[in-house]
Image (spheres, grey):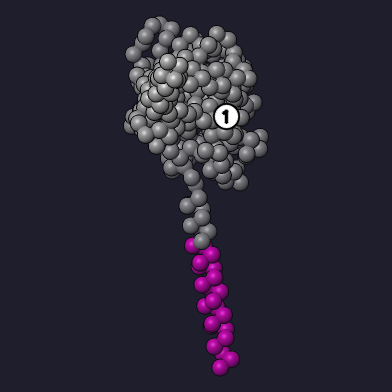
Amino acid sequence: MTMKKTLLVFLFFLLAAPFARGEAGISVKDPWVRQNPPGTSVTAAYMVIENTGATADELLGVSCGCSAEASIHVIEMGEDSMVMKEVPSIAVPPGASVGLSPGGSHLMLEGLSGDIKDNVVLELKFRSGARISVKAPVLSPSAAQKRSSHH
Amino acid sequence: MKKYYLPLAALVLIAVVWFGILGFLGTDNGTFHGDEYRRPAFDFSLTDHRNQKFSLSDHAGKVILLNFGFTNCPDVCPTTLGMLGEVLDIVGDERAMALFITVDPERDTVSKLGAYIPFFHDRIVGLTGSQQAIKEVNDACGTLYSKEQEVSEEDYLVIHSPAVYLIGPGGEIVLRYPKEKIHPGKIADDVKRLLL
Ligand SMILES: [Cu+2]
């Protein structure tokens, strides 16, 4: 009886393993958030999302305790203008890493509850079911410059 | 045999001078990193973030970086301002300055800019003014901007050019940097050359 139970538990984990690996395929590197200038309540978060798994995944949403709203934005270049567009998701193909960086795709934080400093925590939600919580340092303009020019 | 030395030496000298001139012209025209954008000297008067009148003509002799934006902009504008701050630090010369001209004068009042601008650099000047005055500066630079579909009176974005302009000591626009040419080290090189 207990033997059967153990076997069942073992079987369960064996079956669940590929799914767990699928979730572990997504990771987030180098997250940071731009310190909001005084008097403003919007800013943006940046990072590299890596998919080391074998299946395609998608960033579906983001939230932050620091802001009322958080959304996924891409930048579209016009003839001589830049337009931010909210998109429902960002694809992260297997084996790919997708960079969110200044002047490009970013996570936009609107309605900040106050001036942010030190670190903020971002919760990312993926189609695979993965939920990743990242602690992102808040960078001043000069620290942000250093960070971007190294990449 | 000896009489050939002099013409030969003269030829060598001519060659050296010639290639020297070519080389000089080459570097002189070739090392600006921005796109040549010769526009005649122009002037404008706006109000700065310290509530002082600012006229471009009062700053003749300086090399001025100019960029358009608005304070409610979460990504592009603060990125550009951070970059301009780095350029000013690299150049390290009092005769270099940067201007941030709002394309959203309704919301970007003097006090709003007064809180916003010093966060980036003490030699960046934020400018606002009437809709008409702002439009005239944009026209002089050849830039367009438009309010994006308004979510509400308070909540909207302004579509604008991410380009940076470089104004020479004579008040004329010399260079324009489209987004892909914006690099602080390279812009700083151009500023230093214009300050020579
Ligand atoms: Cu955005």
Instruction: Specify the farthest residue to the bottom.
Output: B1
Up-down relation of residue B73 to residue B97 (above or below): above
Residue B184 highlighted magenta (yes or no): no
What x and y, as percent, mark residue A25?
A: 43, 30
Residue at image point 38% right, 6% down: B152
Instruction: Specify the farthest residue to the top.
Output: B153
In the visual, does A10 lie left or right of B113?
Answer: left
Q: Mark 1 points at which residue?
A: A144
What x and y, as percent, mark residue A1?
A: 42, 15
Is residue B24 in view from this perspective?
yes
Magenta stretch?
A: B1-22
What x and y, as percent, mark residue A145?
A: 57, 32
Residue at image point 40% right, 26% down: A14
Residue at image point 57% right, 84% down: B6
Q: Nearer the viewer, residue A18 or A47?
A: A18
Secondary structure predominantly adopted by residues drawn in magenta: helix
What x and y, as percent, mark residue B117?
A: 58, 21
